[in-house]
Image: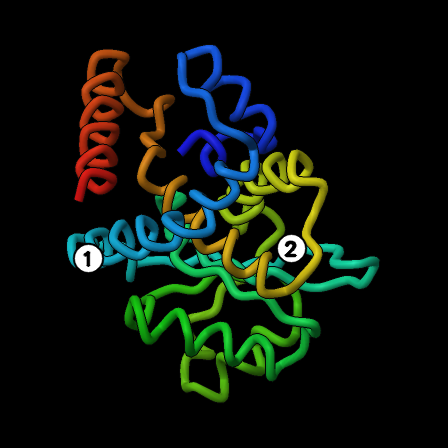
Amino acid sequence: MLYIRFPLSLRNVEDLLHERGVDVSHETVRYWWHRFGPVFAAEIRKRRIAGMRSSRWRWHLDEMFAKINGQTHYLWRAVDHEGEVLESYVTKTRDKKAALKFLKKAMRKHGRAEEIVTDQLRSYGAALKQIGAGARQETGRWLNNRAENSHLPFRRRERAMLRFRRMRSLQKFASVHASVSNHFNHERSLSSRKLFKLNRTAALVEWRQLCSG
């Protein structure tokens, strides 16, 4: 949880655990993340998808630039109106074909959104028209701020990891990071301190149940 949720390196996590009396190497932390991170993330996604109905109201779609061995790749991300990251997908191109694959992948899991907010990239419009959802697209200068702001936690995490070396690694970490961020994201600015503390405690209890299971 420490490694995925916070912008820490493997050695930072090793030092934090040592301070708490747990003596492990950073390679052990790496093994834990590769072995158990996707398992916990899949369980979180399953529970949230089953309990979320409002995620079909409005989606915000945007793509991030990511460097892998000096080459530019694109991380497509779908975010709902509350900031929940619904889907992440890595591609080498930013054309209609890539946008279509991303949309189909998101819709298979979450259904069809009533409104889809995008930037001015033409690939979105072409892909949405092909699947019969062109009328649901909205574009505007500030309409997609929800997606832009959702990139920030991942950008901070990316810098701590000194970027990625393979597409597969980026795809894997983006999916796990999105699930863990959703689980611990409580929009503290929109609730009272008392309610935020209750939600935070409940999220930590549920995480511990996942780990013990």
Residue beneath the point at 58% across and 24% down: 12
Q: Alpha carbon of mark 2 to alpha carbon of mark 1: how far? A: 27 Å
Residues under numbered marks 2 and 1 in contact, where contact means CB atoms less than 8 Å apart = no
SS of the residue at dot 1? Answer: loop
User: Label 1, on which residue?
Assistant: 53
**How far across and how far down the image is residue 31, in percent?**
48, 45
Q: Nearer the viewer, residue 117 or 192?
A: 192
Q: Nearer the viewer, mark 2 or mark 1?
A: 2
- Earlier residue among tags 2 and 1: 1
Q: Is residue 5 left or right of residue 148?
A: left
In the picture, measured across the screen, residue 176 lies left or right of residue 99, that is: left
The amino acid marked with disc number 2 is Met
Q: Residue at x 49, y 88 (%)?
A: 130
Closest to the observer, 57 or 55: 55
> What x and y, as percent, mark residue 91?
63, 71
Residue 64: which disc? Answer: 2
Relative image position of residue 126 (x, y in whole percent): 58, 82
Which quadrant of the figure contains the N terminus?
top left
Q: Position of residue 201 (x, y in %)?
A: 22, 22
